[in-house]
Image (cartoon, rainbow, N blue to C red):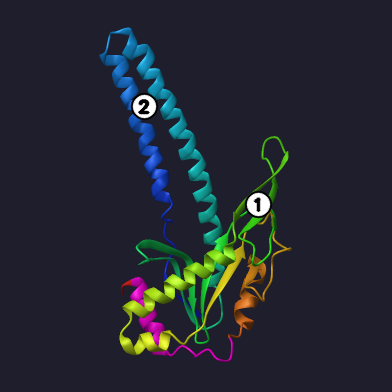
Amino acid sequence: MVATLQLQKPPRAMRWVTYWKWITIVLVVTAAAIALRFEHWAPRFVLAPLILVGAYYAYKVFRHRGRIVGEGSEGEAMVAKVLDGLTMEGRVLHSVQFESGDRQRELDHLLITHNAMFVIETKYLRGRIAGEPLDREWTLHKRARKTRSRYKRTFYNPLKQVATQIYHLRSHLEKNLDPRWAQECSQIWIQGVVVFAHPQGDASSVVSHQNGVVDLTTLPKFLAEYRPPSRAHRLSYGLRREIARVLTGQ
């Protein structure tokens, strides 16, 4: 059975939701204070309304970012539930955060088995997804919620995104593991996996087990049947333990 070593935590993007929430509150309070304190017409009838306009804009950004982060968290929770219920031997960590390249990095999920490590990126997108593995951007085709009109938007190729995550994860581990374990870590295989989890999403044109792109229903089978390249080294029990220690601090 998979051992869950780290539970899902709020994503780092939530700090921006909180940031815009407080901007909204501060602007509303400032406008109210100006309207109540100043008797001159300019502050009360010009400045205060302008500040309220800014507060309305901040509120719209807060609602928009909150919806996006909330939907993303819902998708990550669905994937976490599947990973926690795997019958294969391994260790799973959710919401893994570490510093690399002078930036804070975040992995949705990390599964550590004796064959390979899996960096798992969750995408919770409603609509039809199209793209090629080597494209810089993929396209999401969908309908507007209210008008039902068709539109499309692009998003960064998640395969390239997860490849960058793998690079920084390996760099972080080799830097922070003891030399003995760092040498072993340099020879293991880290596989990127992109999971499309939205029940109203159509990722059939991009799903490819060869490239590590799956949907939520086929994720367990992909992980159970995955075999790394023959040149890759197996992960010893000690290395798996040390990787978990470095990433969780426990």
Residue under label 2: 28
Q: Amino acid at mark 2?
A: Val
Q: Amino acid at mark 1?
A: Arg
Give coordinates of residue 135: x percent, y percent: 64, 62
Decide: is 194 above or below 10.
below
Give coordinates of residue 201: x percent, y percent: 68, 56
Nearer the observer, 55 or 250:
55
Could you say whether the residue bearing mark 2 is in a helix, strand or loop?
Answer: helix
Give coordinates of residue 211: x percent, y percent: 64, 73
Residue under label 1: 126
240 falls in the magenta region: yes
Q: CA distance from mark 1 to mark 2?
A: 34 Å
Decide: is 73 above or below 152.
below
* Crowding at mark 1 (Cα within 10 Å: few <14, some 14-19, many 20+): some
> Residue, x 43% and y 52% (percent of image)?
13
Q: Earlier in the sequence, mark 1 or mark 2?
A: 2
